[in-house]
Image (cartoon, coloured by chain):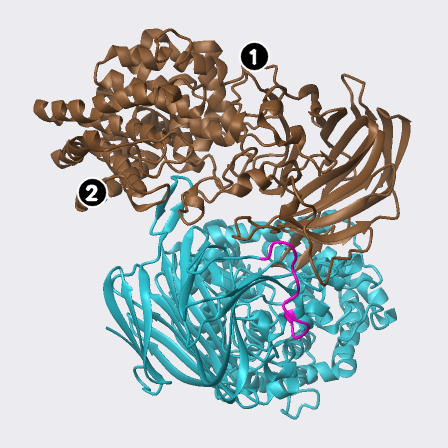
Chain colours: A brown, B cyan
Amino acid sequence: MTKEKVSAIQQGIRQYPLLSASYQEVLIQADAALAAPINVPVPKDGGGGVTHEQHKKNYANIFNCGIVYQITKDIRYANYIRDILLNYASQYEKWPLHPAKKEQEPGRIFWQNLNDFVWQVYTIQGYDMVYDALAVKDRQQIETHLFKPILHFFTVDCKKTLDWIHNHGTWCLAAVGMTGYVLNQPEYVQMALKGSKKDGKTGYMVQLNELFSPDGYYAEGPYYQRYAMLPFIILAKTINNYQPELKIFDYRNKILSKAMNTTLQTTYTNGFFFPINDAIKDKSFKSPEIVLGVNIAYADIAPEPGLLDVAQRQQRVTVSDAGLEVSKAISEGKSQPFDYISTWFTDGAKGDQGGLGILRHGDNKDQQCVVLKAASQGMGHGHFDRLNMLYYDNNVEMFFDYGASRFINIESKGGGGYLKENNTWAKQTIAHNTIVADRTSHFKGKLKDAELTAPKISGFKNTPTIKYLYAKEDKAYTGIGLSRLVGLVSVPELDKPLLVDVFQAQSNKEHHYDLPFWYKGHIVAASFPITANTAELRPFGTDNGYQHIWNVAAMQTKENTGFVSILNNYRFYTTYFIHDTPLKINLVRTGANDPYLNLTEANGFIQSAKGKGVTTFVNLTETHGNVSPGNETVVNAKPSVTHLQIQKKSDRKFSLIFLARETQRRLDIDLDDNDNIIKIQ
Amino acid sequence: MTKEKVSAIQQGIRQYPLLSASYQEVLIQADAALAAPINVPVPKDGGGGVTHEQHKKNYANIFNCGIVYQITKDIRYANYIRDILLNYASQYEKWPLHPAKKEQEPGRIFWQNLNDFVWQVYTIQGYDMVYDALAVKDRQQIETHLFKPILHFFTVDCKKTLDWIHNHGTWCLAAVGMTGYVLNQPEYVQMALKGSKKDGKTGYMVQLNELFSPDGYYAEGPYYQRYAMLPFIILAKTINNYQPELKIFDYRNKILSKAMNTTLQTTYTNGFFFPINDAIKDKSFKSPEIVLGVNIAYADIAPEPGLLDVAQRQQRVTVSDAGLEVSKAISEGKSQPFDYISTWFTDGAKGDQGGLGILRHGDNKDQQCVVLKAASQGMGHGHFDRLNMLYYDNNVEMFFDYGASRFINIESKGGGGYLKENNTWAKQTIAHNTIVADRTSHFKGKLKDAELTAPKISGFKNTPTIKYLYAKEDKAYTGIGLSRLVGLVSVPELDKPLLVDVFQAQSNKEHHYDLPFWYKGHIVAASFPITANTAELRPFGTDNGYQHIWNVAAMQTKENTGFVSILNNYRFYTTYFIHDTPLKINLVRTGANDPYLNLTEANGFIQSAKGKGVTTFVNLTETHGNVSPGNETVVNAKPSVTHLQIQKKSDRKFSLIFLARETQRRLDIDLDDNDNIIKIQ
């Protein structure tokens, strides 16, 4: 919020519904803060615990009271901030490193320093908003005994984090930089921009160069990109307010604008982020970081009308210059549906570390969306899931990613942090929709090896009727080359495009391959008899994640081809497979070797086969029909594709022939044709 | 729709948004019907199959075209009805009993005659709406070769169903009665009202007397009450149009009005029906039957403003006189929140066959709701679940009922009908939240025995701070008396009322008791170590439904008291138990002995103990806190109740003493005090 815009914001609150509603929320919380006694407990508890939650609440209160003070100029809100900060100032210097510290770098207010940085990012904004209302001696007290010790702690004790090219580092930089500006301490601003040594080898500009790909993709994946965007954006906004001459929003070919767009593009149309790598699955673009990001992206970078659509669905704006502009534009009817695109987002600072591929078909109300993960490992939060594939449709997940094993902020579940099963299950390859060779995870589950290399983007097409992504991964297993082609192909006789999935493994030696499809919904039909185990369930294996899944059924198909039909959210999905030899289909469910119930429920079917030379898993998923429980009607419950056959010219060139509602169709696959890997006739 | 109101409805479509939107839906479907070739296939397939769905579509088309003809007077819609009915008339007499018939009484168009009745109820309305537009010879053809043979089939071949006091019978009566009126065949009207012999021993009036309790509760339960309401209401409306002197809506102290209200009262605030007995769980008051029922209830019986609230949430009205009134009233702002009440709905024609008890606390946006099933068996669709208890909160299920084992209309799942597991699992006692003695279902699962007797309503209170239901069941097991008290009790220190649950079993002999709580959500904490089976799962038992659940964990508590905390839909639920001896807590999950994957996923914890004399299971469930995944905050994750103790004066009089946020509270239970079973101090 700038001084110049305060009266316009006051006016906007009366005029624009979204800003008005957003301010009312802030006001309610600020008033609740005023009504409660000030509580600054000595730090004690881990994530989700009482003191942890209280300190989180305190920074939110400080921030909210700052906003309300600016709007109302009611001194009570400024006094609240004064009193609580004086309280912190009276204690902070006495607090040692947090007693609940674990393997993460500790803070003093929270168990990890990351939370201390977040605390400061919000608190310094609240302080800035009431700065003029505070007596000089109070400001001195707060700055001398709270903010300066904090700056010292962040830049000296936490120097390692400050210089870390990682989202924790970004939060540290934002806290240090913003505090430096507000306290008029340019040396700290320099540290934020150029690293602890002010030599430009680390710091914000280096992070902007290295953490994002040229497409604005963040190596840790969408969940952490969402989280990292806030400090990136808010520090940029602060820099732009104090030093507009730096033209920070133009830096690196408008990298922040691209990053914000990519953040939104890595959601499905229901707003939820693709949960690859360590991800909490109920994070959507409604989270506060993205509200702020969208507002600043619209107001300070480029007024894309699709951002207004997102803002409307967020049902909130920030009470700020940017929020004013967004809510005004919405009231003026400038909003247009957010333009989801099909593309590869390249990964790596130079864009040469693979990427995340996305295909979309249909409007934002009912969209098919396919994701192919061919990105780099993404540091410690990365999963061993090269060429993992996700499929969304009808506003829900169909083939999904488990995400992280974590009950965030639930203290009784491992202090709210990542659980042991995050390593033993969630990161393992078998937990993902990609090939596992010899029941061993990619890179044998070793992070260092995985970080050395990335998949290769090998194909892309985006026409109205044929869309595909093609990628290769040669290092996940020694001596095995993996490649996957996924496409959405319109077949005239079918209501919706077919999901085409051709997964090849190539090796001189024989290997055992498992290809899981973790699915939502319920299996309602199959081409072979379903024979689930009735009298006992045993784990599917002993390690690499296999120990965590029950083998519900193990079925040897008699034919080389067959299908499984699933009913999910009142729509049918039939996956046809065709293979060189009959496949073994295993049905599996999470929960084995899980004594503390740390795993959530997931169901999958796994295609298993041995192979030598080139082994090809072909799967075509037809999206069909619907069930209306209210009207008790069913349409197209039976799939329309039948008589699937394969005609091979070579391992890399073959045709899939089938009947689509009695019409013969041929899908030609030529993995060596750079421009037309898939043709339909 | 009456002739007098047609022009008002035409006007209303221009004026009232709800009527307008509803008409647009009808118009789209009618136009789709006109655009497609007429298709009257020879009946062949079972539920969900192609010919089944086509004939369903045909009656919907006939009905929709009738409406659009009335509104537009466009002859094309009348011609469609003429052509399709002439087509039916050219074939119907040749059709034998349906080839896919099963144990149900067969129809000729559908595999069960029930669907034929439904077909005729809609078709005769469509015919009536275009009657004036058809040539006399076409009408003769249709009546002679379709409707009269249908009437003959329904009243002669299906006589048994016509005279059956059951919802199938109701549909038959409605079809026969409405067709009789439209064809001016009074003898058929007489059969509808007084049974096939016209002697008044069966038929509609007898059904009105016997199928509903004096409170308007229908013995089969809410799911079938919803289904039965349509023929009841639409035949009443027809009678009222043709013979207003019968004052059918006033019959039996306005029983139809009461029944409609009870239908709505047996939903939770999210609109979904309590799924007791054989119930498909995704049925809500948005289903078409209830749209019609609400419209007629408002327009023809009593204009309760709460019905308008329901109509708004249905987002539809019927395009009819009644729909006009409802949409007009909504546009005039007359709507008020539907008034959900706490009450016993008595069961049985005389109201002496137990009942369904409901407690509600909180407004319609966030309501706690407890259901105690102490009703009669409810005929063949009844489950063996005397004193079953359901708990809803925060717009979702917490302790739930599995409902029926059926994939309705999914032909690949047993033809869409009830599955074998409906008998072996869904009806069995262990599938419900009530006591199972000696691992045997109530009445040993024998319908005839269960139908002979009903539980006894033994207590009720409904004050702002204390609400309870109390009921007894002495016949479910020979020699064991069961009684259950469930209440919602406000404790000043707690955010929401405590769910109090005191379940007693009394017997001279020792028995093994299992008390399941089937829950939604995920167990996140317990007072005892959770030790789930890691290496194998075995069924919990061998029969009576036990064979269908895996025993995930079997834990012997060391104390007489303890708790289990569950996180469900971002809110916490902690169930404290206290017992005479330490309990065994079993965690269970559906899926055992389920080779075809007919069961859906359900999780439960079961309290197990042996007991002789009076065995008392006390459970207090605290509803607390919340998790905000967007803001990453957690509030009150830890429960506030601690140190639960029991002080007994006798088996039927005791106090539960506990700390609620450090304040000592005492809950006095006196099961012999008729007016104050629960007191809180």
The disc numbered 1 marks a residue on which chain? A
Amino acid at the residue labelled 2: Asn
In the image shown, does B143 or A614 lie closer to the viewer?
A614
Q: CA distance from mark 1 to mark 2?
A: 48 Å
Residue A187: % across, % down: 27, 10
| Sequence order check, earlier mark of 1 and 2 | 2
Indicate whether A497 appears above or below B402: above
Residue that numbered label 1 is attached to? A350
Tell me if mark 1 has few (under 14), some (14-19) or many (20+) residues whose alpha carbon lies within 10 angstroms of its own: few
Is the same chain shared between marks 1 and 2?
yes
Quadrant in the picture for the C terminus of chain A: top right
Asked whether the beta carbons under mark 1 and mark 2 sit within 8 Å of each other, the answer is: no
Q: Magenta span covers which residues?
A: B533-546
Amino acid at the residue labelled 1: Lys
Residue that numbered label 2 is attached to? A39
Q: Main secondary structure of the magenta part?
A: loop
Residue B520: % across, % down: 51, 58
In the image shown, does A100 or B4 lie closer to the viewer?
A100
Q: Say if residue A681 shows up in the picture.
A: no
Residue A83: numbered disc: none
Instruction: State the residue at coordinates (45%, 15%).
Output: A208
* Left or right position of B315 against A493: left
Task: Say what secondary structure mark 1 lies in.
Answer: loop
Residue B38: % across, % down: 79, 54
